[in-house]
Image: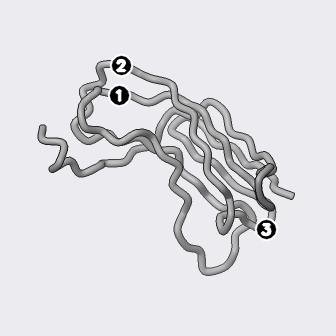
Amino acid sequence: MNCEDHVPEWALAILESAQVEQDPAKEGYILNVSGHAPRDGQCCERPRLHPREEYLVQPEYWETMVEWDKAGALFQSIVPFNLSMPLTGFVGTKGVEVIGKNKSFKIEVP
């Protein structure tokens, strides 16, 4: 596969943990997630956090999916990952919901 022609195909990843902490550098919060995803060592993108882009009304818990790129994956190995993302603009009235293939976490954000 030519990596320049690679088109990601996102699927939910195996989720191990999720937590929210205050951002020490700024006002706001950071979402930290860990889990496992297949990796073929070819052209796949690294796992990502993908917040739901829009709601008609602010939800109680803003959904964020934990995803990996399965396009062209050969499932040669399962590797751990750690991801972080600022929550600015992606917090519901109560907090966030982090969604993986095997589980989800609802986390309250002050």
Amino acid under label 3? Thr
- Residue 62 locus on image (x, y percent): 66, 62
Q: Which residue lies furthest to the right in this view?
A: 110
Q: In which quarter of the image is the C terminus?
A: bottom right
Mark 1, residue position: 39
Q: Which residue, given by chain and number where applicable, does mark 3 sit on?
A: 93
**Left or right of 11 in this view: 4:** left
> Which secondary structure, mark 2?
strand
Residue type at mark 2 is: Ser
Measured as percent of width and height from the top left, residue 20 is found at: 75, 46
Q: What is the quadrant of the N terminus in the image?
A: top left
User: Which residue is the extreme one toward the left?
Assistant: 2
* Residues at marks 3 and 1, CA–CA distance in whole angstroms: 36 Å
Secondary structure under the numbered disc 1 in the rendered image:
strand
Q: Which of marks 2 and 3 is in front?
A: 2
Q: Is there a contact, CB below 8 Å, between mark 2 and mark 1?
A: yes
Name the residue at the front extreme.
25
Q: Residue at x 71, y 50 (%)?
A: 30
Mark 3, secondary structure of its residue:
loop
Neighbour tally class for label 1: few under 14, some 14-19, many 20 plus, Cα within 10 Å: many
Q: Where is residue 4 in the image (x, y as percent from the top left)?
A: 17, 48
Residue that label 2 marks: 77
Q: How crowded is mark 2: few (under 14 residues within 10 Å), some or many (20 or more)?
A: few
**Of label 3 and label 1, which has the lower sequence position?**
1
Name the quadrant containing residue 35. Answer: top right
Q: Mark 3: few, some, or many residues within 10 Å (few <14, many ≥20)?
A: few
Rounded to the nearest angstrom, the CA distance separating label 2 from label 3 is 39 Å
Q: Which residue is drawn at 18% across and 42% down?
A: 3
Q: What residue type is labelled 1?
A: Arg
Q: Earlier in the sequence, mark 2 or mark 1?
A: 1
75 or 30, which is in the foreground? 30
Please give the name of the residue rendered at 53% of the width and 49% of the height, measured from the top-left corner.
Answer: 49
